[in-house]
Amino acid sequence: MKKVLLCSIIRNQQDNLNLWFDQIKKITEEISFEYECYLSIFENDSVDNTKEMLSSFDFSFLKDFLIQKTTLKTEQYGSIWSIKRIQNLAFYRQSCIDNGFNKFSNVTFDKIAFIEPDTKYNPKWSKELILAKHPESVGIKPDVYSGWSLRSNKNPKESMYLYDTCASRQLKSDIYWNFHREDEWKNQSLIKTFFSHEDSYCLHSIYSTFNCFCVYNAEPFYKGIKWGYTNDRLNPSNIKVNDNEYLECDTVNIVETFRKNNYDKIFLNRNCIIRHL
């Protein structure tokens, strides 16, 4: 049976954890016929009831799990371009993987799925991101496969706006998400499939993605690929970190690192809608 490592980095999420837990449980049940599910949680510096809630959950539905609680005394940032923030996020995400690999050292994972704790999604749809039945039906085995994150329904005016404009980049030449290019997807990035009518326009090739629920081929991480926060291409921040490197969103950096190592099958499924809370 295949194996997937579910990963979540969590801080001060007491208001969202019950939903996060219920969705993790449901998606685990949805894919249990094909995947054994392991969970790695990286929690740091929470000052609400996050730690207590994580300890109270019954994770017995999983093959195994790890809750890593840490005190790093790092600042909690909003969605801003900051060297320290992005450096921290890269460290958290890589630690979440490394901790899981170390804890479950007798397991070789096929996939790694990062699921943000402050999101709402339908497990019956989003299981596709782990199973990858749509791309496999046309002979594609994704190296990175994500859903499509939209802003909260609490604000109807913004409910259909893309949330993850930082990591979502349609083309290599993009240094930000270009909303005006969305109309060109039908001709440029859309994969024509033989799926049913309601699914026929869901699968897209994309340069970079994360979108709050993102599944990665685990093999590159076993080969030493690490999460980072710099690249050698111009990016939106224009913040130079090293001689030839600029600050980059960590979730873009990992995709670029995948691509440089010939793991370049990057896809997004717009039917797997992930709502940011």
Image (cartoon, rainbow, N blue to C red):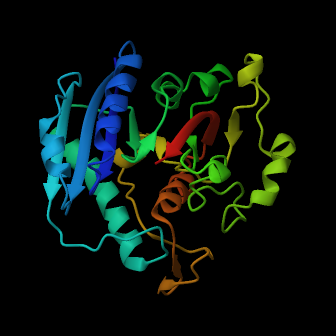
Q: Residue at x 76, y 34 (%)?
A: 191
Which quadrant, please, contains the N terminus? Answer: top left
Q: Is residue 177 above or below residue 68?
A: below
Q: Residue furthest top?
A: 33
Name the image quarter holding residue 232: bottom right
Q: In screen coordinates, is 157 left or right of 126?
A: right
Q: Is residue 164 above or below residue 145?
A: below
Q: In screen coordinates, is 209 left or right of 215?
A: right
| Rendering coords of residue 5 (x, y %) | 32, 36
Q: Residue at x 62, y 40 (%)?
A: 268
Name the image quarter holding residue 201: top right
Q: Residue at x 66, y 66 (%)?
A: 176
| Rendering coords of residue 10 (x, y %) | 29, 52
- In depth, the one of 52 and 110 nearer the eye is 52
Name the image quarter holding residue 73: bottom left
| Rendering coords of residue 248 (x, y %) | 51, 70
Q: Is residue 213 above or below residue 252?
A: above
Question: How many numbered circles are shown?
Answer: 0
| Rendering coords of residue 276 (x, y %) | 49, 48
Q: Is residue 105 visible?
A: no
- In depth, the one of 157 and 68 nearer the eye is 157
Q: Is residue 72 visible?
A: yes
